[in-house]
Amino acid sequence: MSSLKQFIRNVRAAKTIADERAVVQKESAAIRASFREESHDSNVRRNNVAKLLYLFTLGERTHFGQIECLKLLASPRFADKRLGYLGTMLLLDENQEVLTLVTNSLKNDLNHPNQYIVGLALCTLGNIASIEMSRDLFPEVETILSSANPYIRRKAAICAMRICRKVPDLQEHFFEKAKMLLSDRNHGVLICGLTLVTSMCEADEEEGDELGVIEMFKTLTPHLVKMLKSLSASGYTPEHDVNGITDPFLQVKILRLLRVFGRGDAQTSEQINDILAQVATNTDSSKNVGNSILYEAVLTILDIEADSGLRVLGVNILGKFLSNRDNNIRYVALNTLIKVVAVEPNAVQRHRNTILDCLRDPDISIRRRALDLSFTLINEQNVRVLIRELLSFLEVADTEFKPIMTTQIGIAADRFAPNKRWHIDTMLRVLKLAGNYVKEQILASFVRLVANTPDLQTYTVQKLYASLKDDITQEGLTLAGSWAIGEYGDALLRGGQYEEEELVKDIKESDIVDLFGTILNSNYAGQIVTEYIITAAMKLTTRLSDAAQVERLRRLMLSHQTHLDVEIQQRAVEYGNLFAFDQIRRGVLEKMPPPEIRESQRVLGEATTKSKRTSKIAAKKKPSQTGTPPPGGAPTHPAYNKNDLSIMFQVQRSGSTALILARFRNTSNFDHLSNVTLQAAVPKSQKLQLQAISNGELDGGQEATQQMRVAAVSGALPPKLRLRLKIGYQKNGENVQEQVDWSEPS
């Protein structure tokens, strides 16, 4: 048989996929044959398993080699064990039945006198431990945590983290050991100990601090503060120095744990405020190492109950990040500022110019994040400046940005417009620049605005007419213009001036009819445009005084009575028949009464005055309620928040039943979520009725709902409902399937 090196050479030498497939299949068959021969030569077995691992990296099937890996790790030789454990970690997972055969070998190796063999066993257990293996082997891991050898102590800490995740009931066995690890002098052990404690605290936090794990470890806060202060102020230590900074990895781990301790706890936050200010002030930001510590410090400042001055310091650090030449640093700064703007809006506003500069960055991900942040900054005071900048960006923006930009500019103008004239001018500019990307809600909002502003109707229709004379390629502009001309054609014909600004003069009735004919005969006259033009033309027949032009409009409609589209044909026929009833026609085609603008009719509901992405802790302290308020004041609880999909539950109890309203929201501005589904299961003592989701396709910012009814089979429902959720959706063409266990917070 060939060696591993020769096998790799043969694969790389293949000139086509078919040649590579032939080489792989031939070698795979040879490995199978060798396994069947039951060779007792460990060198042959190692060579075969090594080639299997290479096949695994190529994505080939390797299940037939699992037993050979177990044979290698059971060997007394270190070289065999090393490859056997590596193969076991890669080729097996916690769901494989074969894994039960590994438990005894792991138990023996965890008690081996050789530290490197113990390390191999710990590494494997930390990667593939199942629930059963965790229960069987946790005493050995607990014992190793008390070992004098730092090499295996740190591996045992990471292994303990895996065990605690798989079997939360076993956490209590590691509490005291974890405290001991945080007093260790070895930095490697400290980092692993901090990782273990942070994992246990975060798991308890997700369960609502039921076990009091965070409270138990909070007593270590002064010790951690002292340790961080020592690291921050210490001089050069060759053993731990990274670009002039002492052990940045340990500093980041300490900051992360302090963040967990300080969330929602003013007293603990007070203890760590000073050290956070010291780290934020004294850390060198000229190198990436320092920036990583500063970033973690900022996240901690913004998550805990820090005072306002410290929060402003954190925002200013993020502002400095925006001026960094490294795209990664600028990206994380923008991403974090989006979460901060709801908490410290004034501090973020100071960096507005820098954020707007990022809109011109060559990196599309930076532009996207800067755009998200720019919309969250808009308020009554800066709406003119920011919208002007955003309109300039809209002029040169990539196609993928335009739909969301037109929507968000419409929302901002709807909420913060200083006056109606500015609002109309802004929307006219949007229609000119990106009329093909304007959503129906934005167009409807603009129509309501014009209808409810009588003193600006002449100005608006003149502007729209002039714009259509210049450009008929933008569908949104054509739709708005045709509606306005049909509705206010008489005002357009009166012409005149507005506020000393020359607009359109001496418009003839024939000019309007010519414009409609030009649009209908162009390549841009789709179904919707044609429908709008025909209706507008019909309305104009009661607004024009020249009988010849009215006749032209009538012939224009007659020409569409044989149109292939049924809707257009029906409209043309009905409008044509109306000409026989002149009095009725004039009554039918009167101006529409202006629609009432209610808050519920505003563009897409609420505008993004605050960040849609609040920090994790803000969401935990006070779950956000989007859209309409819950009926009857039902509380809202977060159930899922990942990949831009947020699911909130509103629970209403009534006797032995509970009504649950699931609210889905796409928190992204750009990404589309499709095929969104939610399935649920309840304990056997309950029964569940699940209705269909209202909308499985969610664009950026869109919401959907789904109702569930949980009833007790007998007696009353438990104080806390528990559901097993299966969530499915598609994002960027990839299918996502996740299973989540949700329990109702107390």
Image: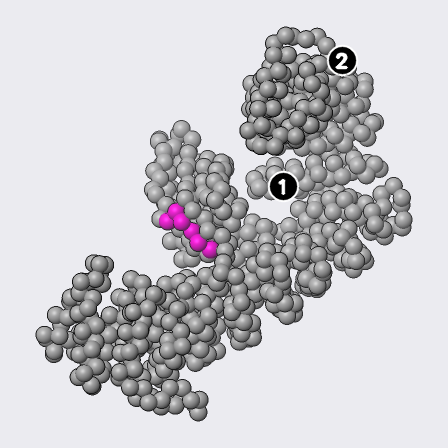
The reply to whether the C-beta atoms of the residues labelled 2 and 1 are less than 8 Å apart is no
Q: Is residue 224 left or right of residue 575?
A: right
- How many C-alpha atoms fall within 10 Å of the one at disc 2: few (<14), some, or many (≥20)? few
- How many C-alpha atoms fall within 10 Å of the one at disc 1: few (<14), some, or many (≥20)? some
Q: What residue range appears in magenta?
A: 695-700
- The residue under the point 83% across, 36% down is 186
Marks 2 and 1 sit apart, C-alpha to C-alpha, by: 40 Å
- The residue under the point 18% across, 75% down is 554
Quarter of the figure with residue 721: top left
Q: Secondary structure at mark 2?
A: loop
Q: Secondary structure at mark 1?
A: helix
Q: Is residue 148 something one can see in this rendering?
A: yes
Mark closer to the observer (2, 1): 2
Amino acid type, callout 2: Pro
Quarter of the figure with residue 526: bottom left
Give coordinates of residue 556: x percent, y percent: 21, 72
Give coordinates of residue 456: x percent, y percent: 37, 82
Residue 148 included in the magenta stretch of the image: no
Give coordinates of residue 482: x percent, y percent: 31, 73
- The residue under the point 42% across, 51% down is 698
Give coordinates of residue 302: x percent, y percent: 65, 56
Residue bearing mark 2 = 76
Amino acid type, callout 1: Glu
Q: Is residue 353 left or right of residue 419?
A: right
Q: Is residue 25 left or right of residue 580?
A: right
In primary-sequence order, the first of circles 2 and 1 is 2
Residue 696 included in the magenta stretch of the image: yes
The N terminus: image quadrant: top right
Q: Nearer the viewer, residue 745 or 544?
A: 544
Residue bearing mark 1 = 202
Q: Is residue 122 left or right of residue 689?
A: right
Q: Is residue 110 above or below residue 194?
A: above
